[in-house]
Amino acid sequence: MATTLPRPPSRQGDEEAPVAPANENTPLLSGAGASVSVTNTVDGPVVAVSRPQRLVYLDQIRGTLMILQSIDPFAFYVTTVLFALGVNIFFGAVILALEQTSTDRLTAALSRLGPERARRDAVLFSLTAYLLSAIVITSLASIYTPTPEHSHDPISWWFKVFFLPTPLDGSSKFVSMYAPIPWLGMVIWGLMIQRANTEFKLKARTNGVLHAILAVCLLLIFVVVRLVGGFGNINPDYLHPPPRESIINFFNLTKYPPSVAYTTCMLGLVHALAALYIFLELRFKNTSWTSERAPLLVYGRSAFFFYVAHFYVYQAMRAIFTWFGWTGPFGGWTGGQQDNLPDGWFWVSWLAGLAILYVACAKYGRFKAGTSPDSLWRLF
C-alpha cells in the first residue's frame, strides 16, 4: 500500500539524490510539487521522493520578459511577434498548471470508479475542454474583424493590444502588429496534443499515425471552409477573383489576425511535418538524420536564440554588402528592388547566414544544456 505525504522541509545535513539538469526532452509539467511516496514492504517502509522536472514559473517569467523586450519605445509603440509569443507562453503556462490541478482534483472526485478509470475520465474531460476552447478562440477573429470600410472606426486600446492588429499608417503612435489572443487557440491545441501524448504514453509509430490523421482532417476542414466561403474566412468578398476561381487567392489567407482557414491550413501542415519527421526518425534511427549535429535539431533546440540572432546576423551582412556597394541602404518595407541583391546572391547570402547561425546555435545549445534547471540562461 502506498500513501503520498507532503514533502517535509529539508534540514541541514540531509542528503538528497542529485537532480539531472532539464533539457529539451524534459516534460512541460510533471506535477505541482515534490511529494514523498511511502510503500510498505516485507522489509519495512520504502520512501521515494518525486520532484517536478520543469519549473512552470520560469515559463511565466520568460513570457513576461519577452513581452517587455518586444515593445519599441521609439517613434511608435509597437507590439511585435515577441509580444504575442510572450503573452501566449505566459497564458499557456498558467492554463497548463490550472488544468493539471483540476485534473488531479477531478480524479480524486471520481475515485469511486477505480483509480485507472477515474484518471482516464478526468484526462478525457480535460482534453475535451482543451479542444472546445481552441475551437472557440480560433473562431473569434472571423466574427469580430471589421470590414475595410470600418477599419478606422474607433477601437479601444486594450482591444487593439490583445485582439485586433492595427496598421502602421502613421495615424497613431501605437501599433499592434501581433495581437496575441487570436493565436492562443493554437497554443491550447498544442497543449492538448502534448497532454494526450504524455498521459497515454503513445508509441512513436502511433504518434506518427495520429499526426497524419490530424493533418488530413485539418486540411480537409481548410478546403471546405475555403470553398464554401463566409464564416471561417476574414473578408473573403474582397478577393478578386474569388478563392474558388483562383488558386493563388485560394491560398491568400488572412494571418493578422489568423482566420479559421489560415489556422486549419497551417496546423494541418505542421501535423503533416510532424508525422513525416516521426516516420523518418523511425526509418533512419541512429543515423546522421538523428545526430546531435543535425542542422534541424541544432536550430530547433535553440529556436528562440535563432529567432533573435538571425535579425542581427542578416542585418550585419546587409551592412557589409552596403559598405562594399553591392546593395543600397536598407529602406524598410518600401525599399526598391534595385537596392537588393540579385536572386542568386540572395540565396548564397541566406545559406551563409544559416551557417553562421548553425555554429552559434550549437554552442549556445551545449552551454544551455549544461546549466541548472533554474539558471537564468534557460530564460533565453
Image: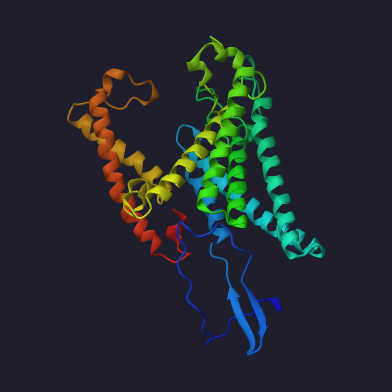
Q: Could you tell whether 58 is left or right of 315 in the image?
A: right
298 and 196: which is toward the camera: 196
Residue at image position (45%, 56%) is 24
Give percent across and percent down for residue 244.
Answer: 57, 14
Residue at image position (48%, 32%) is 76
Q: Quick check: 75 above or below 23?
A: above
Give percent across and percent down for residue 210.
Answer: 57, 44
Q: Could you tell whether 301 is left or right of 131 in the image?
A: left
158 and 309: which is toward the camera: 309
Residue at image position (55%, 36%) is 215
**Quadrant of residue 128 within the rendered picture:** top right
* Residue 148 appears in the figure: no
**Quadrant of residue 53 within the rendered picture:** bottom right
Q: Quick check: 296 above or below 159?
A: below
* Residue 325 appears in the figure: yes
- Report how many numbered discs are placed on residues in the image: 0
The residue furthest left is 324
- The N terminus, quarter of image: bottom right
The residue furthest right is 112
278 and 143: which is toward the camera: 278
27 and 54: which is toward the camera: 27
Colour scheme of the picture: rainbow
Give percent across and percent down for residue 368.
Answer: 39, 59
Give percent across and percent down for residue 54.
Answer: 54, 62
Q: Could you tell whether 321 is left or right of 300 in the image?
A: left
Residue at image position (69%, 26%) is 143
